[in-house]
Amino acid sequence: MENKIVSKPKKRWTAMDTVVVLLVLVAVAGLVYRVIYAARKDLAAESTPYRVYFEVLETHKDVLAEVKGFDAVYLCEDEIRLGYIGVYQDKATGEYTPALTVSPAEEMNHVTATGILVCNNATPAPGGGLRVEDSGRYLTPGGVLEVRTDRAILTIRITSIREHS
């Protein structure tokens, strides 16, 4: 009796193997994408922006001229970022202008203004106010704050707070 060694045929990588691996990779990538998309959507829903309408108490017109659209706004006393100066977009030109309406005051060089502050880092509080995240501070209609941008310090009175639509 003779012993024959029978060797098994070697498996080779086929085009079908490549297709199966690619399909598995696409399925995993799709799953990861859906999870990330859902997380971002939930985060966006949690951080609903609010519009804080305010009036700038009497200030020098040159100070108010330094306030630009999208300027970051901070509380002066503890440097907590409240949001940014809101803007209006001109539909014809596409240009942004700050959401500030200036009115002359009794004194020639002084003005008052009304404007919009967009707050992303706030949650609604009872009584129509907002709680500024990470600070424990509340913004309420009628409240007076000293705020700053990179170029100006302003004293504002909050007139109303609305959810940004």
Image (tube, rainbow, N blue to C red):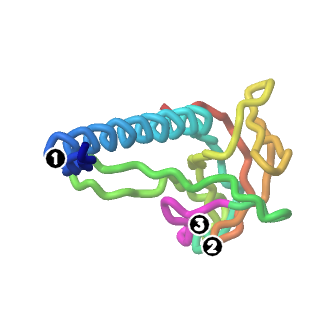
The magenta segment: 64-73
Density class for disc 3 (Cα within 10 Å; few <14, some 14-19, many ≥20) is: many
Label drawn at residue 14: 1
Magenta residues: mostly which secondary structure?
loop
- Element at label 3: helix
Total numbered labels placed on residues in the image: 3
Residue 35, position as x, y percentages in the image: 48, 36
Residue wearing tag 2: 150
Looking at the picture, which amino acid does disc 3 mark?
Answer: Leu
Q: Is residue 101 visible?
A: no
Residue, disc 3: 64
Q: Is residue 70 magenta?
A: yes
Q: Nearer the viewer, residue 155 or 38?
A: 38
Q: Secondary structure at mark 1?
A: loop
Say whether disc 2 or disc 3 marks the residue closer to the N-terminus.
Answer: 3
Q: Position of residue 10 (x, y in %)?
A: 22, 51
Res 27 seen here: yes
* In magenta stretch: residue 148: no
Q: Which quarter of the figure has residue 146?
A: bottom right
Query: Where is residue 57 drawn, in percent x and y?
Result: 71, 55
